[in-house]
Image (spheres, grey):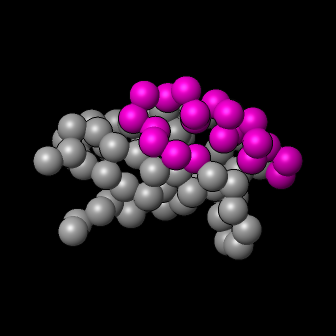
Amino acid sequence: MAARAYVLVHCDVGKARSVKEALASVPGVLYADIVTGDYDLIVVVEQPTVEELGRLVLEKIHGTPGVTATSTHVVVG
């Protein structure tokens, strides 16, 4: 069973759209939506294992210019 998570993303001011566009081309990112509220984006990610999911978040999402912080919520059911 694949590992899936919701990643809540804080962005630099004015960077949500460029972050969304950058993440849309990352393998394993299913959706990236700009939202209102405490976070700027909600990103749905999926990978074959939890370890690969962690690498995607740490290397690809955190490495995206404009991303300042994330909160990852792994689906358990």
User: Is residue 27 shown in magenta?
Assistant: yes
Does the image show residue 4?
yes
The residue shown at (52%, 39%) is 61
The residue shown at (58%, 47%) is 32
Does the image show residue 70?
no
State the extent of the magenta-drawn residues as a range: 13-32
Between 63 and 47, the one lying in front of the other is 47
Question: Residue 56, located in which quarter of the rendered image?
Answer: top left
User: From the viewer's perspective, is 40 left or right of 63?
Assistant: right
Image: 41 above or below 18: below
Residue 2 x/y as whole percent:
21, 45
Residue 16 x/y as whole percent:
74, 47
Residue 43 x/y as whole percent:
52, 51
Image: 45 above or below 40: above
User: From the viewer's perspective, is 72 left or right of 65?
Assistant: left
User: From the viewer's perspective, is 18 left or right of 14?
Assistant: left
User: Is residue 14 shown in magenta?
Assistant: yes
Between 61 and 1, the one lying in front of the other is 1
Question: Residue 59, located in which quarter of the rendered image?
Answer: top left
